[in-house]
């Protein structure tokens, strides 16, 4: 893991800007650790709106709509630590490798992002140093802290997806994604499919290896940690009742499914 720049001499963020990440329930008792890489649609003040119309920042290209709210409620129900990204995926995508062309997208779902075009090496480095590395260094530290209290832990990466993408209506209510390690995905899918009202996507709405997400690769698989990547459809996360329903459903699923390698959830066994 790269080391983040430890300085207050920011070139991208100002003193009044939000921090690059937020950690909630740092010492939660659950062996599950929740991440939300696309929690925010916030843009650093120095970048304005990246040349976009304000309504674009409310759409799926800017963030995973509804996901942060589900994560916060799951953190409460599971007593699990949670890390939330502080800025929009349009500024820099925290779930992409540094050599991925979509790390800082110049176009997202056919929408031009003028503020991401013709960036200098310094401008790219500033986003990496001030947003990407602090988030992932904090997550690495949180994982190590968590491993001190649990023999085995599980990283749950939470995301949400748009119900319509480039003209294709996505039928799935929830997607469970995996790359090399199918153990947790298999159990979660089995638990979810017990409810006939839920349409479960298996490596849908896209395959976890296309592209391979940074979190799954670097934090989970390279460390040999159990991992779950979950996608919820955004139109099912618009109301308070929807948020509560999905948070409760996923808490129930994890409580019943995480017998993998003897992981148990406090208060649910």
Image (cartoon, rainbow, N blue to C red):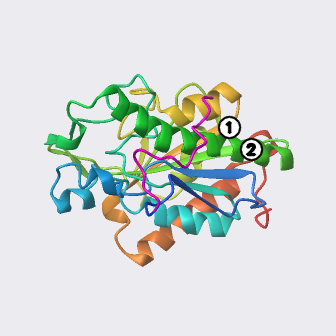
Task: State which quarter of the image contains the N terminus.
Answer: top right
Q: What residue is shown with label 1?
A: 226
User: Which residues are the magenta region?
Assistant: 1-15
Q: Mark 1 and mark 2 in contact? Answer it, CB < 8 Å.
A: yes
Residue ranking furthest to the top: 99
Left or right: 59 with respect to 42? left
For residue 79, what is the image quadrant?
bottom right
For residue 78, what is the image quadrant?
bottom right
Q: Where is residue 133 drawn, in percent x and y? A: 54, 38
Q: Where is residue 58 drawn, in percent x and y? A: 26, 61
Q: Does residue 8 show up magenta in the picture?
A: yes
Q: Is residue 203 visible?
A: no
Left or right: 93 with respect to 223? left
Nearer to me, 162 or 92: 92
Q: Where is residue 30 drawn, in percent x and y? A: 75, 57
Left or right: 243 with respect to 253? left
Q: CA distance from mark 1 to mark 2?
A: 7 Å
Nearer to me, 29 or 41: 41
- By secondary structure, the bulk of the magenta-drawn segment is best described as loop
Are there few (<14), some (14-19), or many (20+) residues within 10 Å of tag 2?
A: many
Q: Earlier in the sequence, mark 1 or mark 2?
A: 2
Nearer to me, 23 or 200: 23
Are there few (<14), some (14-19), or many (20+) residues within 10 Å of tag 1?
A: many
Q: Where is residue 162 drawn, in percent x and y? A: 29, 52
Name the residue rendered at 34%, 59% in the picture.
234
Q: What residue is shown with label 2?
A: 153
Q: Is residue 21 visible?
A: yes
């Amino acid at each position: 893991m790269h080391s983040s720049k430890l300085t207050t001499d920011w070139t991208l963020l100002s003193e009044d800007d939000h921090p690059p990440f937020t950690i909630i329930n740092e010492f939660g008792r659950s062996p599950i650790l929740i991440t939300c890489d696309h929690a925010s649609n916030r843009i650093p003040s120095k970048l304005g709106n990246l040349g976009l119309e304000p309504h674009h920042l409310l759409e799926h290209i800017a963030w995973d709509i509804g996901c942060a709210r589900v994560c916060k409620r799951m953190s409460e129900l599971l007593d699990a630590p949670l890390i939330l990204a502080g800025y929009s995926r349009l500024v820099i995508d925290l779930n992409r490798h540094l050599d991925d062309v979509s790390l800082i997208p110049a176009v997202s779902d056919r929408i031009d992002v003028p503020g991401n075009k013709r960036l200098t090496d310094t401008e790219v480095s500033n986003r990496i140093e001030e947003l990407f590395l602090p988030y992932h260094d904090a997550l690495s530290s949180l994982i190590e802290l968590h491993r001190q209290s649990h023999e085995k832990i599980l990283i749950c990466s939470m995301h949400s997806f748009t119900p319509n993408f480039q003209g294709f209506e996505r039928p799935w209510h929830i997607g469970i994604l995996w790359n090399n390690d199918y153990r947790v995905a298999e159990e979660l899918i089995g638990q979810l499919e017990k409810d006939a009202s839920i349409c479960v996507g298996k490596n849908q709405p896209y395959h976890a290896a296309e592209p391979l997400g940074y979190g799954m690769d670097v934090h989970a698989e390279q460390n040999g940690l159990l991992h779950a990547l979950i996608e919820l459809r955004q139109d099912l996360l618009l109301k308070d009742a929807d948020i509560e329903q999905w948070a409760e459903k996923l808490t129930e699923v994890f409580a019943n499914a995480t017998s993998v390698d003897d992981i148990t959830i406090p208060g649910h066994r």
